[in-house]
Image (spheres, rainbow, N blue to C red):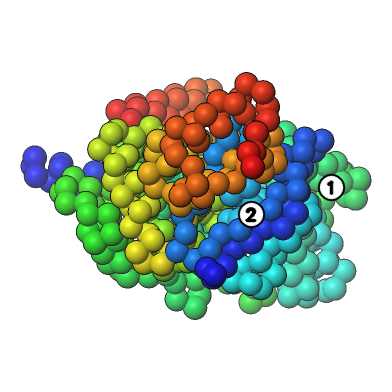
Amino acid sequence: MAEELLKLQNIYKNFGNVKVLKDVNIKINKGEVVALIGDNGAGKSTLIKVITGVHSPNSGKVFFKEKEVQIKSVAQSRKMGIEAVYQERALCDQQELYRNIFAGREITNSFGFLDIKKQRKEAEKILRDYIGFTSKAITVDSQVMGLSGGEKQGVAFGRSLYFNSDLIVLDEPTMGLSIQETEKVLNFVKGLKNENKSAIFIDHNIIHVYGAADRFIILDRGEVVGEFNKEDISREELVQKMIQLHESGKIKVEE
Amino acid sequence: MNNLLNSYFVKTHKLEISITIIAVVLFLIYFLGAPHVFTRFPIYRAFMQSMPFFGIIAISATFVVTLGEIDLSFPSIVGITSLIFGIIMTSTDGNFFIAFILATSLGMFAGLINGLLVTKIGIPSIVATIGTLFFWRGLVNVISQGSGIAIVDVADGTWHHMIFVEKLFGKIPMQFIWFIVLTGLMQWVYRYHKFGNHIHFVGDNKASAQMMGINVDNVKIIAFVQLGFFSALAGIFTMYEMLYFWPTQGEGLMLTTLAAVFVGGTSVFGGKGTIFGTFIGVLIIGSLESGIVALGLSGFYVKFINGLMITVAVTVYALIQRRKN
């Protein structure tokens, strides 16, 4: 039996009158990559923002490493060992790279003043070792503004790896990337398993998802409507399920 | 020369360099146009005397503007806190500590209200602070019933009067020394403190800042609170200089203060700014009136040239910014 890392139980989330998540139950084991799939508005982004502490659920329980927790802020989820890479990259354009990497968890002295030297040194390390930037044009003092989509994604990944986490949440990490850049991202996700890290992975492209994930959870209008292990379903079948869902609003679960 | 222009320092400090050049050119014009005034000390003493009153607020307001927010209520916060300072000074026979603590606390409270209206209620800051601008000025009028308060008996000749506004070595007004010290301190906080760092991130992209674990609301609230504090402080400096409270105190500050911030190069879109630039902006805006009159132009030109300066400066910055993108 695999060891459980994260469990969500009966999660509900409303924005005003709109019920975005309805009774969601999911579980992620250690060393497992789980893909969340579903149409726009299915609640995927909201669900992962509940996990990363951006949103609080209206009701339901969250267990992390088999202990019940309440994730009230991003800072708290990071402290627990959850890192996020968002589709928006979560970087600020006009600020330097070294400031972006440590934003929200700056290296400071006890008066709250930044240790710029150390931040730059660590950022340098992340750029070279985790991301593999070799271009002279990009330094820790570069503004994010001048970076390509893939480079920005690289920074977001490097950051998530540097802060030794157990669970990495990836919200559409391949959106807007070139083919080579996408390949890099997928390899990165596969590489997480070797380090016994877990990941939740949202992507619209089922081909990407199928290659990288161990398990697929299908969300529709705020509910989990299907869950499949990779060994139980072929890529074609998965695509068929999604088309079926799209057309009829239901998934036929056989046997 | 080419090397110098391409150096890292120049690339990252374009705004600061532009504004410094503008200031140098301006003072050269003064110097050449009115040497009998600008080669003598009194004009500089007058500048050092008058600039800190709005300069302190401009430095502090740079934080709020970097957030992409604005505060229009500070002239009235100056008014209400000065009034309270005057009332307490006269009724306690010059108890500086109580008067100082209550006046600055009231300033921070007024800032807190602005911050809460903007973050928790969700009113755009330009609208919220127009409301509080009228509210605090209205309260000043109601409490003071339109009359002033003289603090000359309880403040003149005291040690606090000395450290706030008397002349160091008989020459340098103390408020200018304070202004320099505060500017240095705020520059340090702005660039090298966690709070200053968060100000930049929230002003740059609120949603990203939140996803990076920055408490956006708290950062905004603290920014408004510190502006409330420094507005009160500027009011207290003015009280010591004039030894008198008058009910319209602070009213003329709004445009000069904000002009100094924008001429200084802080982006109205948020995310980028410079305390040094604001400092130079204060020197420019604060010297225009005397400079123009000394040059022999009539006082009618003051607003005109003020407007010209602001428009030219913000146009130059917008162009620099656009070229970057």
In the rendered image, the quadrant that contains the C terminus of chain B is top left
Who is closer to the viewer here, A114 or B316?
A114
The reply to whether label 2 and label 1 mark residues of one chain is no
Inspect the image, locate mark 1, and give the three-letter code of the amino acid beneath it: Val
Residue A226: % across, % down: 62, 42
Chain to which the residue tagged by mark 2 belongs? A
Compared with B131, B228 (above or below) is below
Question: Closer to the camera: disc 2 or disc 1?
Answer: 2
B69 relative to B42 in the view: left or right: right
Residue B122: % across, % down: 73, 40
Q: Residue furthest front?
A: A255
Inspect the image, locate mark 2, and give the three-letter code of the amino acid beneath it: Ile
Residue A142: % across, % down: 28, 48
Who is closer to the viewer here, B10 or B178?
B10
The residue that appears at 45% across and 32% down in the rendered structure is A236
Q: Which residue is mark 2?
A: A26
B25 relative to B257 in the view: left or right: left
Label annotation for residue B179: none
Q: Secondary structure at mark 1?
A: helix
Rendering quarter of residue A36: top right
Tell whether label 1 touches label 2 (CB within 8 Å). Answer: no
Chain to which the residue tagged by mark 1 belongs? B
Question: Disc 2 versus disc 1: distance between alpha carbons?
Answer: 59 Å
Compared with B295, B23 (above or below) is below
Q: Which residue is mark 1?
A: B140
Q: Secondary structure at mark 2?
A: strand
The residue that appears at 28% across and 59% down in the rendered structure is A130
Residue B74: % across, % down: 68, 46
